Image (cartoon, rainbow, N blue to C red):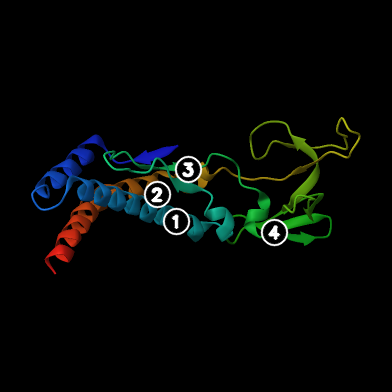
Amino acid sequence: MEIRFTESKKGQIQDIQRKFKSQLSESAIKKGTATAINGVMKSSIGRINKAIKKEYNITPKHLNRISKVSPQAKEGALDAGITVNSQRIPLIGFKPKQSGSCISVQIKKGKKVLVRDSFIATMNSGHTGVYARGRYANKRADGFTYEKGKTKNGKIRISEIKTMSPFSMALTKSVADDVQTYMSSEVTKRVHGLLQHKIDKVVK
């Protein structure tokens, strides 16, 4: 999933670039524009993360993996956006605690749930996660099937428990609309401000 600003907004950015042609080199205008656009994208990710943190008990490590600036604006290319990761988040990303043979966790703040017959463990790779005997029967977060099966190598089959996709967390309509509005209103101001700053530095 990607969030980008509109074609009409790109036209407005190009209008701003033309206003500075008599005062800045083409290279300076293109570099400054790309820097400003990418800065707005990063700020927009901050708004997404803030909305998620307000409702979900997610660790910074996993929160920072949800969204990234992609594609990034480059010299001569105004195209930029935010890509949201579609993979489900490991349960370890929500600060779980072992409670007997179950895992106690608050995915949404204030709502504690128990995941039965599960445990926290660190694999040989160094990765720590929440595991249970069984596997996912489908791609849904609730599609885990508990079973006492074995792998083809004869080892006990365990799988890492995962939960909701970032889409259901980050891209509620209200959050998506807020980010889109922010990007549209901020990007032209940021481009104009950065290019003007370059001129002011030369004058000084």
Instruction: Give the Cα distance between marks 1 and 4.
Output: 21 Å
Instruction: Give the Cα distance between marks 4 and 2.
Output: 26 Å
Badge 1 vs badge 4, beta-carbon distance below 8 Å = no
Instruction: Give the Cα distance between marks 4 and 3.
Output: 24 Å
Q: Vertical placement of 72 versus 59: above or below?
A: above
Residue at numbered disc 2: 175
Question: Residue type at mark 1?
Answer: Ala
Q: Earlier in the sequence, mark 3 or mark 1?
A: 1
Badge 2 vs badge 1, beta-carbon distance below 8 Å = yes
For mark 4, does the 10 Å Cα neighbourhood hold few (<14), some (14 to 19), or many (20 or more) residues?
A: many
Badge 2 vs badge 3, beta-carbon distance below 8 Å = no
Secondary structure type for disc 4: loop
Residue at numbered disc 3: 84
Residue that appears at 45% across and 44% down: 171
Please give the label number shown on residue 96: 4
Of discs 3 and 1, which sits in the foreground? 3
Q: Can you tell which quarter of the image residue 58 is in?
A: bottom right
Question: Residue type at mark 3?
Answer: Val
Question: Going by the picture, which residue comes out furthest to the left?
Answer: 22
Residue at numbered disc 1: 51
Instruction: Give the Cα distance between marks 3 and 1.
Output: 14 Å
Of discs 4 and 3, which sits in the foreground? 3
Question: Residue type at mark 4?
Answer: Pro
